[in-house]
């Protein structure tokens, strides 16, 4: 009898000191969905039609998925708070106007939170003023503010969403390492200064315009190096995202968290199966 009492007391103490309830939260694997642009009648790896996007959000709701924020994910991965059952993180890259015009009303309709990783230099000062006519139009800061009830803004750099010639001569993401700039190969110190300054500037501008600093960055093209990670930490980011098409779970490197590329043609059961069967290795 005494042994049973001791075991009971031990289990009860464990229950009290756990940082989250005993509901299997430590076993959760979170799908993080990556979108970009919405446009009528186009569906591929970077563009989805509003109809198909709404179909995907409706399916998530029907299947019981609950959209979380980057902050919630960060807290969970650091044992600071639990997540709801069947969590999903919805993300967009770049900051296209279609996110405001087409995605935002759908997210509101289905009560789904999302995160947008913006190229901060491309966000417009005023609605409708497109300063980059050769690019798909981006949103304005006022539009980002308007979406704050369902969307949080994170960084996709200030202005490093392009590739540069590397030491090998092959183009590589501008955040990866020393590259040829104006015909000259950077030193490691010059590369680090360029990228660190960009990361810091993106955080400061978002803070200036929206009132909060982003805690996360998504590396352009999902390309990164150990130096990129170091610079993201130095700039003040708490987490970062890549593209590996697998779920995120506790124990994953918080500066290389995977996202799943969602194709505009992923509809119906195929869409849900993609979320369920994403690699977890």
Image (cartoon, rainbow, N blue to C red):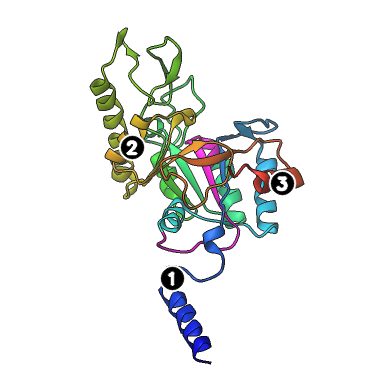
Q: Are marks 1 and 3 in contact (CB under 8 Å)?
A: no
8 up-or-down from 176: above or below: below
Q: Which residue is mark 3?
A: 273
Which tag is nearer the camera, tag 1 or tag 3?
1
SS class, disc 3: helix
Q: Which residue is mark 1?
A: 18
Spot occupied by residue 185 in the image (x, y as percentages of width and height): 30, 11
232 up-or-down from 213: above or below: above
Question: Which one is in front, 43 or 104?
Answer: 43
Q: CA distance from mark 2 to mark 1?
A: 31 Å
Which tag is nearer the camera, tag 2 or tag 1?
1
Location of the C terminus (image quadrant): top right
140 up-or-down from 211: above or below: above
Q: Which residues are magenta?
A: 79-99
Q: Which is more N-terminal, label 3 or label 1?
A: 1
Question: Which one is in front, 203 or 111?
Answer: 203
| Circle number at residue 192 | none
Q: In the rendered structure, does residue 87 fall within the stretch colored magenta?
A: yes
Q: In the rendered structure, does residue 280 fall within the stretch colored magenta?
A: no
Q: Residue at x 45, y 51 (%)?
A: 70
SS class, disc 1: loop
Sort mark 2 into few (<14), some (14-19) or many (20+) by Cα contacts within 10 Å: many
Spot occupied by residue 156 in the image (x, y as percentages of width and height): 41, 35
Q: CA distance from mark 3 to mark 2?
A: 33 Å
Q: Residue at x 45, y 80 (%)?
A: 10
Q: Is residue 271 left or right of residue 5?
A: right
Q: Which is more N-terminal, label 1 or label 2?
A: 1
| Circle number at residue 232 | 2
């Amino acid at each position: 009898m005494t042994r049973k009492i001791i075991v009971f007391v031990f289990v009860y103490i464990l229950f009290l000191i756990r940082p989250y309830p005993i509901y299997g939260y430590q076993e959760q694997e979170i799908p993080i969905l990556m979108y970009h642009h919405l446009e009528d009648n186009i569906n591929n790896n970077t563009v989805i039609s509003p109809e198909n996007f709404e179909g995907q959000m409706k399916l998530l709701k029907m299947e019981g998925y609950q959209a979380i924020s980057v902050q919630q994910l960060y807290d969970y991965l650091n044992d600071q708070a639990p997540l709801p059952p069947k969590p999903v993180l919805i993300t967009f890259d770049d900051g296209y106007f279609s996110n405001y015009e087409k995605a935002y009303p759908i997210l509101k309709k289905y009560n789904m939170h999302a995160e947008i990783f913006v190229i901060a230099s491309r966000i417009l000062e005023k609605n409708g003023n497109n300063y980059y006519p050769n690019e798909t139009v981006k949103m304005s800061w006022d539009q980002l503010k308007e979406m704050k009830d369902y969307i949080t803004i994170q960084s996709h750099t200030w202005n490093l969403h392009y590739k540069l010639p590397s030491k090998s001569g092959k183009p590589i993401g501008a955040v990866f390492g020393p590259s040829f700039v104006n015909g000259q190969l950077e030193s490691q110190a010059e590369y680090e200064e360029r990228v660190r300054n960009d990361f810091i500037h993106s955080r400061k501008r978002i803070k200036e315009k929206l009132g909060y600093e982003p805690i996360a960055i998504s590396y352009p093209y999902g390309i990164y190096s150990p130096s990129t990670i170091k610079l993201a930490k130095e700039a003040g980011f708490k987490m970062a995202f890549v593209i590996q098409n697998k779920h995120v779970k506790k124990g994953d490197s918080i500066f290389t968290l995977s996202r799943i590329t969602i194709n505009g043609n992923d509809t119906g059961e195929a869409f849900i199966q993609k979320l369920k069967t994403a690699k977890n290795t």
